[in-house]
Image: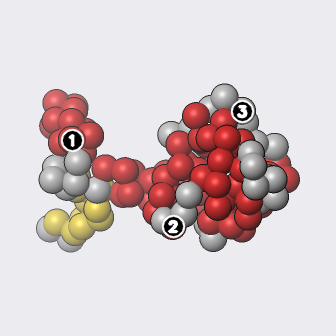
Amino acid sequence: MAIGERIRFFRNKKGVTQKFLGQVVGFPERSADVRLAQYETGARTPKADLTASLVNALSVSPLALSVPDIDSFLGLMHTLFTLEDRYGLTIDELDGEVCLRVNVRHNKDAARLHEMLCSWR
């Protein structure tokens, strides 16, 4: 998921409009929604200072908006959290071993992911 999609996801989860979030991070009222839409659609990429403002405004970890880094445990965990939010992935235990489950009723993407994982298995 690109940074714009992550911004949109957390903005919607927080229940705020593009205009509101844009104003919180410092854009003028008349263009706040347009500017934020540019970042959410990927037309623009936020620089480090704007990303830091978005992290604070959305009350998320900086890793929540960054591109996944699965080479570190912390980056991998944030990737798993994103999979939980987007696809209904849950952690469970089966016969004393940790396993991941996909909630196929979460949404149609989750159902498709389940099919793909079954094919992989």
Residue nearest the viewer, comparing 59 with 81: 59
Q: Are marks 3 and 2 in contact (CB under 8 Å)?
A: no
Question: Which badge, 3 or 1, is on the more N-terminal residue?
Answer: 3
Residue 114 visible in this rendered orientation of the protein? no
Name the amino acid, label 1: Lys
Q: Which residue is rendered at x = 15% and y = 53% of the image?
A: 105
Q: Quick one: which residue is furthest to the front in this view? A: 30
Q: Nearer the viewer, mark 3 or mark 1?
A: 3
Q: Amino acid at mark 3?
A: Arg
Local packing at callout 1 (Cα closer than 10 Å; few below 14, some 14-19, many 20+) is few
Q: Which residue is mark 1?
A: 108
Q: Nearer the viewer, residue 77 or 33?
A: 33
From the top left corner, tell me how far across and down residue 71 is, in percent: 60, 46
Residue 12 position, x and y percent, is 48, 58
Which badge, 3 or 2, is on the more N-terminal residue? 2
- Residue carrying label 3: 44
Where is 3 relative to 23, above or below? above
Q: Which mark is residue 99?
A: none
Identify the residue at horizontal 53%, vertical 43% (top origin): 5
Crowd around label 2: few <14 · some 14–19 · many ≥20 (10 Å) = few
Indicate the colouring scheme. secondary structure
Q: Quadrant of the C terminus?
A: top left
What residue lies at 22% left-to-right and 54% top-to-bottom?
Answer: 106
Judged from the image, the secondary structure of the residue bearing numbered disc 1 is helix
Q: Mark 2: which secondary structure?
A: helix
Residue in view at x 48 percent, y 65 percent: 15
Q: Is residue 75 above or below residue 90?
A: above
Q: Earlier in the sequence, mark 1 or mark 2?
A: 2
Q: Where does residue 52 sit, x and y in percent of width and height?
A: 77, 58
| Quadrant of res 118 | top left
What residue sits right under mark 2 in the picture?
14
